[in-house]
Amino acid sequence: MKKIEAIIKPFKLEDVKEALALLGIEGMTVSEVRGFGRQKGHTEIYRVSEYTVDFLPKIKIEIVVADSLSERACEAVVQAAKTGKIGDRKVFISPVEQAIRIRTEETDEAAI
Amino acid sequence: MKMSKLFTRTHRTLSTLLVVVGVTLSTVVAQTEPPPPAANATISPAPTLEQRVAGLEAYLTNTDPAATLKTVKDKDGNPAIPPGLTTAAIGTPGPGANAWQMTSAALVLFMTLPGLFLFYGGLVRRKNVLSVIGQCYLIAGLVTILWWVCGYSFAFSHGSPFLGHLSFAFLKGVTSAPNTDYSYWVSHNVFSIYQLMFAIITPALIIGAIAERMKFSAILVFMTLWMFVVYFPLAHMVWGIDGFMNGVWNSHAGIKAMDFAGGTVVHMSSGWSALILCLLLGKRIGFGRENMAPHSLVFCAIGTGMLWVGWYGFNAGSALGADEIAANAFTTTTLATAVASFVWPMTEYVLRGKPSILGFCSGAVAGLVVITPACGFVNSTGAVIIGVFAALIPFFFIVKVKNFFGYDDALDTFGVHAVGGTLGALLTGFLADPTVNGNIAKGTNAASANGLADLVANGTAWLEQLKAIGLTLTLAVVGTFVIGSLVKLTIGLRAAPELEAGGLDVNEHGEEGYILEA
């Protein structure tokens, strides 16, 4: 199993969700996060006071998929979230040791 | 006794109405009038039809209904009313005049509650929004009590050129009959409450400079003292019938200045005091390092709209009657404000590439401030000129000068109200037009007696305005420095640093403005 963490632009969430659904991936965890990378923040001016807003709002999607599906899932996320402009953010893939479905206590791929 | 008075008044009103219907009917009315009571030893002289109609016409022109009754001379040789001669128009408020004045009073209160507290409250950080609201309410209640006790009397009763006496203390004698020193048709008590609303908003404006760090107890003590040392004397000097700077109404004014709705009394006094108090107080913790962005520009914009609407009561209401001067003030207020609210953000658009919403709001407020002393004296062209200056000068002041000096006038009370109020007082001297306001034109009025009308006619009234600016500025600066220092040395001005850091809402009021989880 692989865990895919994707940090994307908030308005791309629907596109990514649909692209993953086409692969049969229907479950995911989504959080509103803030951060910065190369894009940096922006400047706000109130009369004369200037403030740099470093941390921009982004969406983090977490999904866990079978090894066989991980490559296609990553590709789907990348294509759906891409605008080609700075600030598209990143996808991280990591191995998952074990998964348990709490309701049924099924384990591993049966649980995801 | 009361019944007979009521009967007499009703009877007079009825017959007066009939007189107005037509001259032909007047003989019929005269025939139906009961004969005068023969029981009285001294028979009161009856007014002529001419005198009664003149009293009614005085209502239309917002002038003295007693003028044509003054047919004899008193012992000093001044025109006087024969004993016992009166008409229904004497001592009676005009219903229309009172309607406009009560509406205007409510509009001016609306400027503070909630206009100003939303404008200021939106500009502070979330942790201090309630403190600003609380300070505005505190001032509304506190100043009303002071006004009732002796504030109104100090400001508006006869006295020295610098302060009134105590003849109206506890609003004694302040009844529904007009006080003809100020208005022939507005009830004295309505006039008093209308002026109270100005006394409330003026100290409330100072809050903008000291927001987010001055402690509640210090505000309570400072504002109480400030009303006695700065506001009441200044209001008397500028608007009191025997005031030192009341060039329009006082024949013996020392400084022949014009201030229609409070450029000196309200905006210069609060603005200059705000600067001194924020210097005594010191900067907010983290000023210049931490993010102190406004927590809600939406509130700020709502408050600005309310200020603009309420300001019609402030400016046009200052005519004390819905007359031609009020109509002119209403027009000039609209023009100057709209122009300034346009020019300020457009200046940003050109210089920074983005017109800001705070720019629209700041421009509107600056326009309102600068037109305030001028609104009843300038024409529509003058108002547009004022609108342009009102945007550009405070804008450059706040953007360039404030950063240079580095003081922490948190919400720019000084930059908008002191700079704008001073500018407005000066521009009034240059742009005053006697054709829009007969009170500054040559004729039989106080401005002609003291020479103001000549100064306006030959274009040198601005010199008198400069003197008024100097006196106002000195009183505000010295008065605030003394009171502020006294409070600082006794109970202290600032909240403790840990309380300031945690926010005044929780630490001084035990409440939070927003509990979003609830």
Image: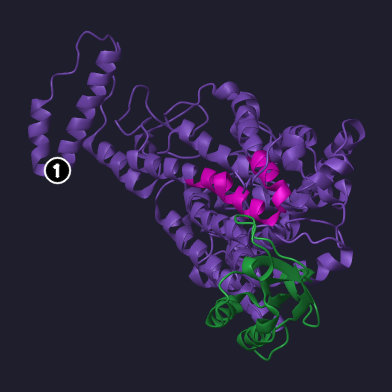
Chain colours: A green, B purple
Instruction: Label 1: state its secondary structure.
Output: helix
Asked where in the image residue B65 lies, by quadrant, the reply is: top left
Taking the image as drawn, is residue B93 in sight?
Answer: yes
Q: Measuring 46% from the left and 59% from the top, which residue is drawn there?
A: B330
Magenta segment, which residues?
Answer: B107-136
Task: Residue type at mark 1: give it.
Answer: Val
Which percent across, then down, holds residue B454?
A: 59, 60
Secondary structure, magenta segment, majority class: helix
Local crowd at mark 1 within 10 Å, few (<14), some, or many (≥20)? few
Locate residue B271, reporting x and y percent: 73, 53
Q: Is residue B129 or residue B46 the one in the foreground?
A: B129
Pick the residue in front: B292 or A25.
Answer: A25
Q: Chain of mark 1?
A: B
* Residue in view at x 43 percent, y 44 percent: B103
Q: Which residue is mark 1?
A: B21
Query: Which of B280 and A45 lies nearest the eye of the viewer?
Result: A45
